[in-house]
Image: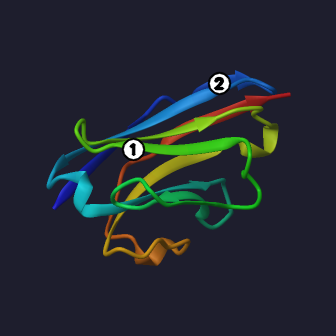
Amino acid sequence: QVQLVESGGGLVQAGGSLRLSCAASGRAVSSYGMGWFRQSPGKEREFVAAISRSGAVTEYSDLVKGRFTISRDNAKNTVALRINSLQPEDTAVYYCGAKGGAVLSRLPGDYDYWGQGTQVTVSS
């Protein structure tokens, strides 16, 4: 079992930046591929980025590529998402998920554990 807690969300003006963090406890996060997803009211949970267990491989949604950067620190049991050039359409609750196995996935159903989410609101 692993418990995930996201932090770092907030209200920011368009063009600004945020750094979201996901802290893991329980089993070591190095055992899991990690992903960030987001969900807006009335919409399905949407893939944002994923990172392999070692951090060597990353994958991004085309919507965020070039603006978002996922990273991890296995020694600190944390995963981060750096978001630059925020736009109003980035407004959502952002979730981190942990997935067993070596293969990255863009599908929420493939993830075994989720945090409670952190709200990101971008004003225009």
Neighbours of disc 1 within 10 Å: few (<14), some (14-19), many (20+):
many
Q: Quadrant of residue 109?
A: bottom left
Furthest-front residue in view? 56
Q: Is residue 20 left or right of residue 68?
A: left
Q: Secondary structure at mark 1?
A: strand
Judged from the image, the secondary structure of the residue bearing numbered disc 2 is strand
Lower position in the chain sequence, tag 1 or tag 2: 2
Q: Amino acid at mark 2?
A: Leu
Check disc 1 and give the amino acid type. Arg
Q: Are marks 1 and 2 in contact (CB under 8 Å)?
A: no
Image quadrant where one finds the C terminus: top right
Residue 104 image offset from top left, x and y in percent:
47, 71
Location of residue 85 by image quarter: top right
Q: Is residue 10 above or below residue 24?
A: above
Question: Which residue appears at 68% of the width and 64% of the height?
Answer: 43
Q: Residue at x 73, y 23 (%)?
A: 16
Q: Is residue 106 placed above or below 70 in the rendered structure? A: below
Residue 118's spot in the image, x, y percent?
49, 39
Say how the picture is coloured: rainbow
| Residue with the mark numbered 1 | 72
State the residue in front, 124 or 80.
80
**Total residue callouts:** 2
Q: CA distance from mark 1 to mark 2?
A: 24 Å
Around disc 2, counting alpha carbons within 10 Å, would you say few (fewer than 14), some (14 to 19), or many (20 or more)?
few
Would residue 117 be found to the left or right of residue 86 on screen? Answer: left
Question: Comparing marks 1 and 2, which lies closer to the viewer?
Answer: 1
Quadrant of the image occupied by residue 82: top right
The residue lying at 25 percent from left, 55 percent from top is: 30
Q: Residue 51 or 47: which is nearer the viewer?
A: 51
Question: Where is residue 75 shown, x and y percent of the image?
Answer: 22, 39
Residue, disc 2: 11
